[in-house]
Image (cartoon, helix red, strand yellow):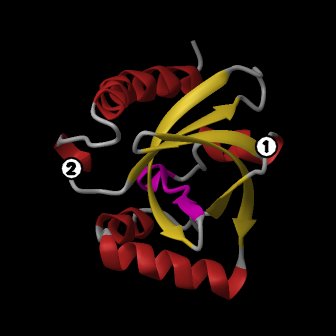
Amino acid sequence: MEGNEITAIVAARYNAPVIEEFRANAGVVGGAFAGAALLLLTSTGARTGRAHVTPLAYLEEDGRYLVFASKAGSDVHPDWYFNLRAHPDARIEVGPDVLDVRSQEITGVLRDVKFAQLTALFPYFAAYQAKTDRVFPVLSLAPRAN
């Protein structure tokens, strides 16, 4: 088994109870995510084409959801980021609502402003950023018309 496969298995085991709790309680979870704005992102695997569900903190702005590819300060982007680059159409669960969305990366000064807003609300993201030279991508998830 390669390192990426092991990392994916560990992440899935960590995320599974969070996803279960989220769905059982209409988006409310405890533990490390208690009180955080949390959504579930279902993205399509860039290499596999399989669906992957990932809990993510977000900022809501003008009807769209901003997510941040921190991977807890890892030196590589999270898999879901690469999934969205390959397949920008995805699905999110926010509370009891399920929305089809299209992702778009936010760059430049606007990215920096949005990341500063996030770290003001969730200081641990600043600690994650301090662990790496990688700049965390910021993505907008905007609902798609059906």
Query: Residue 104, how many percent across, how many down?
Result: 75, 60
Q: Residue furthest top?
A: 1
Q: Quadrant of the N terminus?
A: top right
Query: Residue 29, how many percent across, how many down?
Result: 25, 41
| 18 shown above or below 146 | above
User: Within the magenta stretch, is there residue 113?
Assistant: no
> For the residue carrying disc 2, how many other residues have a C-alpha within 10 Å: few (<14), some (14-19), or many (20+)?
few
Query: Which residue corresponds to mark 2?
Result: 34
Q: In the depicted view, which residue is nearer to us: 141 or 107?
A: 141
| 133 shown above or below 146 | below
Query: Which residue corresponds to mark 1?
Result: 146
> For the residue carrying disc 1, how many other residues have a C-alpha within 10 Å: few (<14), some (14-19), or many (20+)?
few
What amino acid is at disc 2?
Answer: Ala
Q: Which residues are magenta?
A: 64-74
Gap between marks 2 and 1, in whole Å? 32 Å
- Secondary structure, mark 2, is loop
Using residue 111 as the reference point, say whether residue 128 is left or right of it. left
Dot in front, 2 or 1: 1
Residue under the image location 54 percent in, 68 percent down: 133
Residue under the image location 62 percent in, 63 percent down: 137
Using residue 132 as the reference point, say whether residue 137 is left or right of it. right
